Image (tube, rainbow, N blue to C red):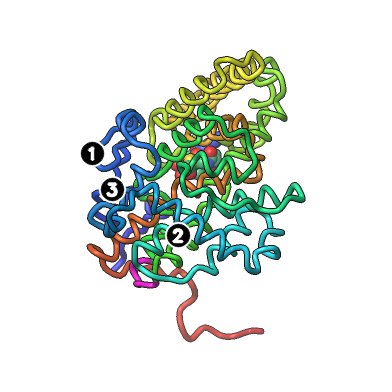
């Protein structure tokens, strides 16, 4: 019997989830019953970790809070990473954090989960220090996750910057069955363990069609230069058949709501700096031109701004170098990967789709 093939699994529903819903027609993201603006208003990153892990993992033992437990996990991961991490930290940053996370033991318990949430932050900060010829700095478990990440990384870490990074981590923590989350669930469905799921997810995240896009967004903005050059530059890129980084999405047929959440966080952070405001205004002018040209280029396909456009601007404003942007994305999304992996183990079954064979029939003549 010939069955239809869904290349790219477009429109295929592969899991029931309590975690998040992406409404691509209305441009809405819901995480555990909270719209994105409500989530940002009510929860910091630790709160979102607690929300996502609810009923899937036990809460930290009393009297430890989620913030305290995550702080302790950062310390544990740092101590472990100190032994033998120097070689791995010489790799490109996303490969470095993947290699260091691969050293974590596999398990399905809260301790493993918290160490995995802590690890991308601890190792990205250590990579940043090493790239400047400095020694990694130990975590401070009394600080919030975002504030401590900036401190360990040696970036300007005032309350405004910490709030901005925290808002970013909350915004990207979970987003339906995206490629990396699906990878996490596939591995979880074999009951391999949370570390294995997170490693698969990081590998899916690093590609430029997924979490590898924000670095190239900045490259594109640099290549364009002043907004007056955007029309000619973008037209030429589209004529060459290139994709504009930071635009388009598999699910959203309207603007990605995360783009506006990050734009708002960035505008708040940079309000007092005339230079930063000018920079943001230039990017917004280029965005407007890009959206218009994409509409003319593909009137049949709604191509609008996605989360990565403002991710690039926001992480740049916080001082993260562009080669670490995907690692910072992983710092937030790791919470969703783990929650989905646990949900898959508890409620799903082995994920094993089929392929359609289009090769030669058996019994063909071998000529070489
Ligand atoms: N610029 C120019 N053209 C585009 C863009 C873009 N950003 N996005 C899609 N198109 C075109 C494609 O070339 C394709 O044309 P074709 O049918 O002639 O081949 C058509 O629109 C549909 O493209 P698809 O690949 O089917 O779109 P899909 O929804 O599968 O892809 C994706 C989504 C991968 C995000 C795509 O829009 C893209 O490559 N964007 C640029 C990279 C990017 O920003 N990635 C981050 C995504 S957000 C995230 O993962 C967190």
**Ligand 1 within 8 A of label 2's CB?**
no
Give the residue at mark 3.
19
Label 3 CA crowd tier, 10 Å (few <14, some 14–19, many 20+) = many
Q: CA distance from mark 3 to mark 1?
A: 8 Å
Question: Is residue 190 located in the magenta-colored stretch of the structure?
Answer: yes
Q: Is 204 in front, or is 346?
A: 346
Give the residue at mark 1.
33
Q: Is 148 in front, or is 119?
A: 148
Q: Main structural element of the magenta stretch: helix, strand or loop?
A: loop
Residue occupying the far right of the picture = 133
Residue sitting at 63 percent across and 39 percent down?
Answer: 320
Q: Nearer the viewer, mark 1 or mark 2?
A: 2
Picture layout, residue 351 above or below residue 35? below
Label 2 CA crowd tier, 10 Å (few <14, some 14–19, many 20+) = many
Percent from the top left, x then y, of residue 206?
56, 52
* Left or right of 249 on screen, residue 36: left
Q: CA distance from mark 1 to mark 2?
A: 26 Å
- In terms of secondary structure, where does tag 1 sit? loop
Residue sitting at 41 percent across and 57 percent down?
Answer: 114
Question: Is residue 103 located in the magenta-colored stretch of the structure?
Answer: no
Q: CA distance from mark 3 to mark 2?
A: 21 Å
**Ligand 1 within 8 A of label 1's CB?**
no
Label 1 CA crowd tier, 10 Å (few <14, some 14–19, many 20+) = few
Question: What mark, if any, has residue 319 been given in the picture?
Answer: none
Question: Which of marks 2 and 1 precedes in the sequence?
Answer: 1
Give the residue at mark 2.
115
Percent from the top left, x then y, of residue 16?
24, 54
Residues in magenta, as a range: 188-192
């Amino acid at each position: 019997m010939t069955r239809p093939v869904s290349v790219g699994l477009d429109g295929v529903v592969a899991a029931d989830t309590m975690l998040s819903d992406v409404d691509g027609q209305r441009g809405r993201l819901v995480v555990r019953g909270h719209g994105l603006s409500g989530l940002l208003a009510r929860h910091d990153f630790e709160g979102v970790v607690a929300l996502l892990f609810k009923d899937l993992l036990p809460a930290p033992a009393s009297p430890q809070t989620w913030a305290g437990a995550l702080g302790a996990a950062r310390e544990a991961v740092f101590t472990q990473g100190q032994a033998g991490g120097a070689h791995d930290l010489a790799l490109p940053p996303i490969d470095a954090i993947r290699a260091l996370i691969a050293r974590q033991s596999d398990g399905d318990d809260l301790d493993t989960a918290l160490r995995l949430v802590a690890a991308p932050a601890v190792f990205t900060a250590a990579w940043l220090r090493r790239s400047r010829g400095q020694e990694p700095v130990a975590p401070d478990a009394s600080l919030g996750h975002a504030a401590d990440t900036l401190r360990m990384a040696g970036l300007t870490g005032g309350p405004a910057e910490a709030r901005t990074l925290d808002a970013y981590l909350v915004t990207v923590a979970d987003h339906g069955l995206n490629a990396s989350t699906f990878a996490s669930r596939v591995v979880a469905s074999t009951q391999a363990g949370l570390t294995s799921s997170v490693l698969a997810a990081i590998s899916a995240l690093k590609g430029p069609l997924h979490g590898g896009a924000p670095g190239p967004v900045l490259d594109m903005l640099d290549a364009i230069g002043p907004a007056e050059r955007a029309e000619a530059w973008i037209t030429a890129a589209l004529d060459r058949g290139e994709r504009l980084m930071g635009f388009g999405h598999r699910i959203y047929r309207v603007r990605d709501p995360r783009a506006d959440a990050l734009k708002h966080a960035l505008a708040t952070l940079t309000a007092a700096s005339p230079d930063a405001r000018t920079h943001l205004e230039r990017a917004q002018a280029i965005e407007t031109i890009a959206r218009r040209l994409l509409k003319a280029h593909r009137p049949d396909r709604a191509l609008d701004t996605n989360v990565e456009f403002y991710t690039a601007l926001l992480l740049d404003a916080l001082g993260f170098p562009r080669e670490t942007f995907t690692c910072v994305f992983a710092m937030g999304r790791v919470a969703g990967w783990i929650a989905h992996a646990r949900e898959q183990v508890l409620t799903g079954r082995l994920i094993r789709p089929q392929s359609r064979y289009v090769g030669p029939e058996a019994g063909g003549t071998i000529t070489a």
